[in-house]
Amino acid sequence: MPVNFLFCAKRHGAWICCDVAMMARNGLKSLLSVAVTLAFGVAAAQAQASIGPQGPEEGVIRQQSWLIPAQDRVTLMRTTVYRPQGTGPFPLAVINHGTTQNELRRAGYRLPQYTALTEWLVSRGYAVAVPQRPGHGETGGPYYEAQGGCANADFAKAGLGAATSIAAAVDYLTRQAFVRKTGTVAFGHSAGGWGVLALATQVLRPLSGVVAFAPGLGGRADDVAGKNCAPDRLVAAAHRYGERARVPSLWLYAGNDSYFSPELSMKMVQAFRSAGGRAEYQLLPAIGSDGHDFIQSPDGVALWAPLVEKFLKGMK
């Protein structure tokens, strides 16, 4: 008795499947036919998924799941939105996660959560969005942040790939009635922090400033603490961003960051400033076992909160 194997693809709750045994029996023509069927099926599943809010608000900070179109207008970014009580309009804060060049690890990414920062921002009157960018976890879709090998790493291009995803989220959200059209602040962690520095170079009318927690790319090369994939290229990319930066930025690092040493982070910000970028830089003391993730640490709030508060007030 023949055994049938199904190959299935899922997109936003819709499964598209084909019979692998049939593919093998019918040869290449069938393979091509099935590939086309899958492609159109996934596209149809995407089209059927409604953008915007996906369920009710929950809790005091009104947590709600949203689907937001990415830069390709096909991929839908899984996003968690929070907001204060009332109708607004509220200024917008968008918090952006890190990445990895490892495709399998990216596929396993969970929806990002930055609880302490989110609650802090909502308490200060911000609507907060935390999108999962294309190429990661449940969002899926194409990956726009490939940096290439260490010998020819293009960190500037990779950051701009993240920035286009972030800009798409800002563009969509600032069209909502509860969001102000101006005063948007982009926050980012690690590669997300690098992405918001790239975002600062773009013409994006709502954007007033960016806050980068441990920004950079290529850290922990070969999984070695303190080793960067191509540090000179990273510094050169920071200089390129500084040449085009349009809004002020705040760079925050911890002294025990295993991805970007104090020496490297200082070189990056100096390159950014020397090219004309407006940057405040703060090196915080060691936080936890690895300061790279201090944005997630309860012990870090007392250190970064006064600095972010001052920066936000300075933008107004």
Image (spheres, helix red, strand yellow):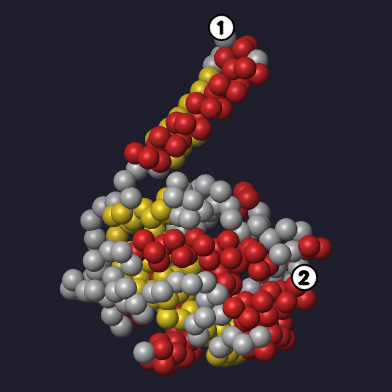
Q: Secondary structure at mark 2?
A: loop
Q: Residues within 10 Å of mark 1 (few under 14, many from 20)?
A: few
Q: Nearer the viewer, residue 255 or 12?
A: 12
Query: Hey, what amino acid is under mark 2?
Result: Ala
Residue 294 in sight: no
- Say left or right for 79 vs 144: left
Q: In the rendering, which numbered label is found on residue 230?
A: 2
Residue identified by numbered label 1: 1
> Compared to 183, does 43 lie above or below?
above
> Mark 1 or mark 2, which is nearer the start of the sequence?
1
- Residue 194 occupies which quadrant of the picture? bottom right
- Say left or right for 126 vs 116: left
C-alpha separation, residue under disc 2 versus residue under disc 1:
56 Å
Residue 180 x, y percent position in the rendering: 29, 74
Residue 50 x, y percent position in the rendering: 31, 46
Query: Hey, what amino acid is under mark 1?
Result: Met
